[in-house]
Image (spheres, rainbow, N blue to C red):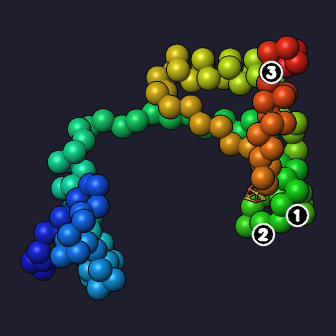
Amino acid sequence: MQQAPVEFHHPAPRSAALRWTPATVTALFELPFNELLFRAQTVHRQHFDPGTVQLSTLLSIKTGGCPENCAYCPQSAHFDTGVEATALMGLDAVLDAAQRAKEAGATRFCMGAAWGVAPRTAILRRWRPSSGA
Ligand code: SF4
């Protein structure tokens, strides 16, 4: 199947003629998977080293016991999912984990917290150096 190449513009072009339309997006999603994969790889190789992968580490700094009721999530306290709830990790433990991740080759360190609307002030209060966390 020979299709016209898909062109990506970043930032989005101001010209209406170059913008994506619903029909263009639909046509893209209807491509055979391998064609879509090929096009994605082509664009990726134009902008990135194809042999480079970013190594990231994700740490759950507060697991389970979330007061929210997202039915799909095992972190919710509303369901018996077998996930044991833990308190927010202390700052030193998080910093240790980040250091170990860096030493292991990670260039990005992400933190996740089971905590509906994360009360940023609560985290900052807990992690404030003077709090002894
Ligand atoms: S707010 Fe997040 S952590 Fe809490 S139940 Fe929903 S998805 Fe899970």
Q: Amino acid at mark 2?
A: Ala
Q: Position of residue 10 (x, y in %)?
A: 26, 55
Q: Amino acid at mark 1?
A: Phe
Q: Residue furthest bottom?
A: 23
- Quarter of the image where ligand 1 sits: bottom right
Q: In which quadrant will I find the C terminus?
A: top right
Task: Indicate the secondary structure of the residue bearing disc 3.
Answer: loop
Compute the Cα span from label 2 to label 3: 33 Å
Q: Amino acid at mark 3?
A: Arg
Judged left or right of residue 77, residue 32 is left
Judged left or right of residue 121, residue 17 is left
Q: Quadrant of residue 73?
A: bottom right
Q: Quadrant of residue 59?
A: top right
Q: Are marks 1 and 2 in contact (CB under 8 Å)?
A: yes
Q: Quadrant of residue 80?
A: bottom right
Residue depicted at 68% across the width and 17% down the height: 96
Task: Indicate the secondary structure of the residue bearing disc 2.
Answer: loop
Compute the Cα span from label 1 to label 2: 8 Å
Residue 79 marker = 1
Does residue 26 appear in this view?
no
Q: Position of residue 9 (x, y in %)?
A: 23, 59
Tell me: residue 50, above or below residue 102.
below
Residue 5 marker = none
Does residue 64 appear in this view?
yes
Q: Which residue is mark 2?
A: 71
Asked if ligand 1 lies within 8 A of label 3, the reply is no
Going from N to C along the chain, the mark reached first, 1 or 2, is: 2
Q: Nearer the viewer, residue 86 or 12?
A: 12
Compute the Cα span from label 3 to label 1: 32 Å
